[in-house]
Amino acid sequence: MSAAPPPAIEARSISKRFGQVNALHGVSLKAPTGAVTCLLGDNGAGKSTLIKVLSGVFRPDAGHLLVAGSEVSFASPRKALDAGVSTVFQDLATIPLMSIVRNFFLGREPLRSTGLVDWDAAERTTRAALGEMGISLRDGSQPVGTLSGGERQSLAIARALHFGASVLILDEPTSALGVREAANALRHVQTARDRGIAVILITHNVTHAYAVGDGFVVLDRGTVTAARARSAVSSDELQDLMAGGGELERLMGSTTASV
């Protein structure tokens, strides 16, 4: 019987401090290939710091980062991208004033033999990649800022898939979206998983996480407080884990008593 393949990306006992603030303390996370691993937590839980470590924005103060079983040390986001780790940050997924096609390539445009950008080929590629995600491109020259929030997220996900990401990290991709657009974004998450990508979905929305997640990791004040497979937890139980069990009820009770 062959051994199971290593996770597409793994964090082992990652710690990160900013002055006196201990943002992460011994955090471990595994993201298997072809699965959606949801990273949950309230504001200030450490989610953003962890994904910036995974994506090369920050270097950890302690711990180890592995990609496909081999230890890595990312000096920059470009190094992480070169290793197949693509991150779609909530507010930085696209550049609003640039065209759809330019946003799709971001410096990786196809060139003619003359060394000039082949914009016709670039638009065809963009149109085909978005088409595979069920998105019909109207005009590749229009600014991305004219797209809806869901369409921008879809563009960023399609870009990552086209350029061969093995790990796709999504930072709160549904937080500013309506119900219909959030559902579309979550379908694109499932598309990425079905193509064999390891997806790490960062969210504080348990409903969205449970709709697509195969595994769940809960952070609280820089520490992992729970890690569960989907088969081992219900949506209600996951909500309780994120809220700290009965802590929310106790806090609500104490607040009511003091009014």
Image (tube, rainbow, N blue to C red):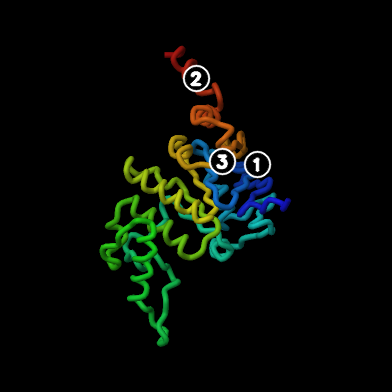
Q: Residues within 10 Å of mark 2 (few under 14, many from 20)?
A: few
Q: Where does label 2 land, which residue?
A: 249
Q: In front of the other: label 2 or label 3?
A: 3
Tell me the amino acid under the disc marked 2.
Glu
User: Which is more toward the observer, 225 or 111?
Assistant: 111
Tell me the amino acid under the disc marked 3.
Gly
Q: x%, y% of residue 34?
A: 55, 51
For the point 56% across and 25% down, which residue is it?
A: 245
Q: In front of the other: label 1 or label 3?
A: 3
Q: Secondary structure at mark 1?
A: strand
Tell me which corner region of the image, top left, top right, bottom left or bottom right, holds residue 119: bottom left
Q: x%, y% of residue 4?
A: 68, 51
For the point 68% across and 48% down, which residue is it?
A: 12
Left or right for 33, reference 147:
right
Q: Secondary structure at mark 3?
A: strand
Q: Are marks 2 and 1 in contact (CB under 8 Å)?
A: no
